[in-house]
């Protein structure tokens, strides 16, 4: 059975978007995974298919109604993880991406306006996830980001299995720099060790580079790496 993704959104035309191209697109055509976008407005109320209302307690903006969102979820609900995208959610990590890739699929709820009534999130036992410390217009872009990250890890999607194990975050480190032909460009030469043919030296150089870059750019991630018992240079 293929990995299944259901996306609940007010803008279903945004899907598959970039997921219909390249590796993810080919895997979608091959049936490695499936994607269905459902319009939340189909479950709206009244003649105008209302999906939102003013927030209790006052304030600007509108909030997606719990009854409408719950009805949309009921149309696709099963044992797959249910995820709501909110700025206050837990950060999306590579570990979470791998966990989802190892499962049967996911149900993603894309908020809009000021967000989704908290009661439906709690009643459904959904998980709140954020892709960064900034605010977007809705959950559609985060959904595309999460799906792209997950799909590339599905069996057979990437050409080389090592691609998923040697990249950033796989060992709580940022990835080492990459180089290709020409060996010299604009007065800049490729690091000599990479053309030496000494695979042990290359592996050591790449590890040292990954550690140094992580220590400088992501001290929080570097601390996690050191906590694993790895030697700290």
Image (cartoon, rainbow, N blue to C red):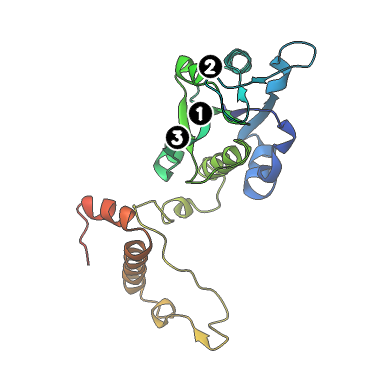
Q: Is residue 110 visible?
A: no
> Residue sitting at 34 percent across and 65 percent down?
216
Instruction: Name the mark on residue 83.
Output: 1
**Element type at marker 2?**
loop
Alpha carbon of mark 3 to alpha carbon of mark 1: how far? 10 Å
Q: Is residue 185 above or below residue 147?
A: below
Q: Earlier in the sequence, mark 2 or mark 1?
A: 2
Say few, some or many: other residues with alpha carbon within 10 Å of mark 3 (under 14 / 14 to 19 / 20 or more).
some
> According to the image, label 2 marks what residue?
78
Estimate the x, y position of residue 81 in percent, counting from the top left: 48, 25
Q: Are marks 3 and 2 in contact (CB under 8 Å)?
A: no
> Residue sitting at 49 percent across and 16 percent down?
119
Estimate the x, y position of residue 68 in percent, counting from the top left: 63, 15
> According to the image, label 3 marks what residue?
89
| Number of the front mark, 3 or 2 | 3
- Indicate the quadrant where residue 62 lies: top right
């Amino acid at each position: 059975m293929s990995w299944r993704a259901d996306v609940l959104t007010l803008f279903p035309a945004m899907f598959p978007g970039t997921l219909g191209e390249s590796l993810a697109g080919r895997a979608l055509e091959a049936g490695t995974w499936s994607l269905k976008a459902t319009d939340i407005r189909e479950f709206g109320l009244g003649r105008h298919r209302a999906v939102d209302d003013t927030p209790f307690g006052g304030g600007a903006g509108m909030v997606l109604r719990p009854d409408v969102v719950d009805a949309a979820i009921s149309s696709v609900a099963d044992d797959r993880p249910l995820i709501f995208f909110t700025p206050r959610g837990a950060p999306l990590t590579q570990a979470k991406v791998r966990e989802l890739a190892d499962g049967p699929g996911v149900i993603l709820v894309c908020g809009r306006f000021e967000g989704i009534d908290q009661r439906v999130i709690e009643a459904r036992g959904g998980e709140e996830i954020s892709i960064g410390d900034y605010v977007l217009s809705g959950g559609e872009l985060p959904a595309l980001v999460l799906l792209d990250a997950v799909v590339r890890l599905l069996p057979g999607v990437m050409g080389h299995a090592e691609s998923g194990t040697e990249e950033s975050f796989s060992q709580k480190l940022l990835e080492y720099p990459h180089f290709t032909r020409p060996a010299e460009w604009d007065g800049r030469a490729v690091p000599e060790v990479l053309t030496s043919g000494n695979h042990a030296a290359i592996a050591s150089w790449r590890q040292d580079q990954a550690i140094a870059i992580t220590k400088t750019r992501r001290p929080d991630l570097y601390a996690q790496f050191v906590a694993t018992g790895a030697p700290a240079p």
